[in-house]
Image (cartoon, helix red, strand yellow):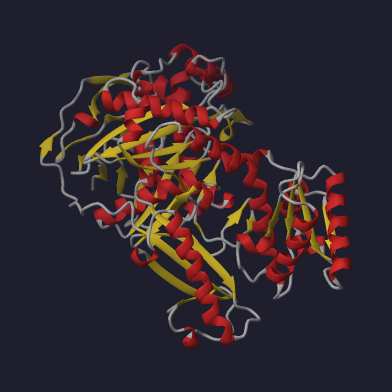
Amino acid sequence: MQKRICIDNGGTLTDICVFDEGSTWTAKTLTTPFDLSQCFFDGLRKISTEVYGSEDVERLLAETATIKYSTTQGTNSLVERKGPRLGLIVDRGFDRAAFAAEGEHADLFDSLVGSRIVEIDLAGDDEEVRRRVIECANTLAQSATSRIVVCLGGDDYAARERAFVAHYEAAFPSHYLGTVPVAVSHESTGDSDEHRRMWSAILNGFLHPPMENFLFNAQKRLRNYRGAAPLRIFRNDGGASKVSKTAAIKTYSSGPRGGMEAVRTAARRCGFGRVISVDVGGTTSDLGQVENGEVLSTLRGRIEGVETSFEMCELVSVGIGGGSVIRCKNGEILVGPQSVGASPGPACFGLGGTRATITDALLVIGVLDPHSFFAGSMALDVERARAAISAAVAEPLGITVIEAAHAMRRTWATRLAEDIRNFAEVDPGTVLMAFGGAGPLIICEVADQLGLRRIVVPRLAALFSAFGLSFSDIAQDYEVMLKGVDRQAYPALVAALRARAERDMEAEGTDLAHCEVKARAISGAEVHAVDLDNPSVWPAELDSLQVHVSAESGGELAAIALEPARSAAPAAGERTLLNPDGSEQPVPIYRLDACPPGSGGSGPAVLEGRFFTGFLEAHWSFAVLASGDVVLERKA
């Protein structure tokens, strides 16, 4: 047996999926931010119990062909500004104001670099240059720099950066105690835009130590299990690679990107032309798009508002989630962006929280069951939820608690619908795909406000990002600057890129001859597909060359037909909801794991999956597909 393990490490929960010959096992465990390797192995222990009936991590790893992993560690490190004290070395005459002129750029630069910046002139004889390099290093050492980033300009920036490193390593050999590590911009990217390249190097330098410490620790612990599969890191470009072949900046927002891989696969499988995805977590919702089977991306993605050298998918995070604080101000109900987080969590969790959330509102209304929440592993306190809603909304507005809960539900749905509308153009043919632990909650009401008629709720909605990792290919991306390079040098550049790719893919256990190689030339914002074997016919006035090398490891799923339900889905009982006037309304409960493909039903109803709940409005119906995913259709 050759199992595949996929782990998505989120800020609150870590999701684990195991796949093997058509079987799927899932588990969740609490994230341990003080030591992410702990929740990594907590998850392995928990999922091994799901697979075998008792804990057996050693057997699980022995039967596993690949482990793919995504984490919020890099994202969180940047958000919290928890990383190394970077020192920056630049050319003489560097214009800091032009580089970080805007408010958010200046704040980010101050947080990551601040005053630890030194200018250098590399002109002159070797002895003079060596002296300047030592002076720069000593100046930064005196400011307690723990990592040096070298970002030089000009068409020959790569050669000049290599010259700096040669002098630095001669003066401060790496085997000496206390030698400060050095990173250079040309190793991060060959982007011809100096500012993008510098920002990319700074961000990568900042993220590198925390990611390296955790990932190598996890990898080391895995090696203690004989025969453990290699750990591959899922990246924000949709590819996966070994820890030693992954740039730290590529881990930024990799978890949400995993969800987009799953959306892309589902869209292709069902033949959807355009999908807007809504990944609703506890604090935020991540919005993305898939068109014609491809994840929409930006050639030069942004991180915290800063344009980088790397392509990233068009993901937008908005401050609304299952734990977003709902309150009143001047007679108006407001949602977020503050969140109660995992601790203390919504008031109904009973962990000390007193602030009202959509989770509390839906518990009071009756959509959520206090005994079956989170697969029955967490009991909810209805009275605490009522007290929080009373204080936050009902009393300020002079209405009943149940009226307040319904008002909170409408406001939450309206806010999410507005965010979706601001993110992308919505038309009646657009399919909404809702996932994440809170994605399906009241997605029908959100779709109603958007005028949409079809929603897909994946069978693994609460673990969809982890599921998406399984479809990623082993891949590497390269960029080399062509600006200022004589065209006669192009063949040599291509040969060097091929040699580099061959080494990297060999380290991944793959022969380059068995990989797909795609190349494109960049000219400003224009992208031209090119043939690597014929550089003489490439367009003129090019800025850079990008090469993508991939070896298929995830694959695709067979197409499935979208058909109306052929039989009635079996109800698992009833749940009593409370209407705004306090009257009771019994509705059926459908536990989706017990609903066979081809079955379905109509609303109003409660849909329950593993780790998620959704409410089906009266004018909506559902049908279970062959994949176990659920399609919701608004009735005419």
Q: Residue 6: horizontal and vertical position, in percent?
A: 38, 40
The residue lying toward the viewer, choosing from 304 and 472, is 472
In the image, 528: left or right of 4?
Answer: right
Residue 116 visible in the shown view: yes
Report the number of discs. 0
Figure quadrant of residue 579: top left
Point out the residue furthest to the left here: 567
In the image, 529: left or right of 270?
Answer: right
Q: Residue 31: horizontal and vertical position, in percent?
A: 50, 28
Point out the residue furthest to the top here: 383
The residue lying toward the viewer, choosing from 480 and 367, is 480
The residue lying toward the viewer, choosing from 44 and 361, is 44
Residue 448 visible in the shown view: no
Residue depicted at 20% across the width and 22% down the height? 572
Q: Residue 606: horizontal and vertical position, in percent?
A: 29, 28
Residue 360 vertical placement versus 502 (above, below): above
Residue depicted at 31% across the width and 41% down the height? 458
Q: Quadrant of the N terminus?
A: top left
Figure quadrant of residue 612: top left
Residue 49 vertical placement versus 318 (above, below): above
Residue 613 vertical placement versus 130 (above, below): above
Q: Residue 525: horizontal and vertical position, in percent?
A: 56, 73
In the image, 260: left or right of 127?
Answer: left
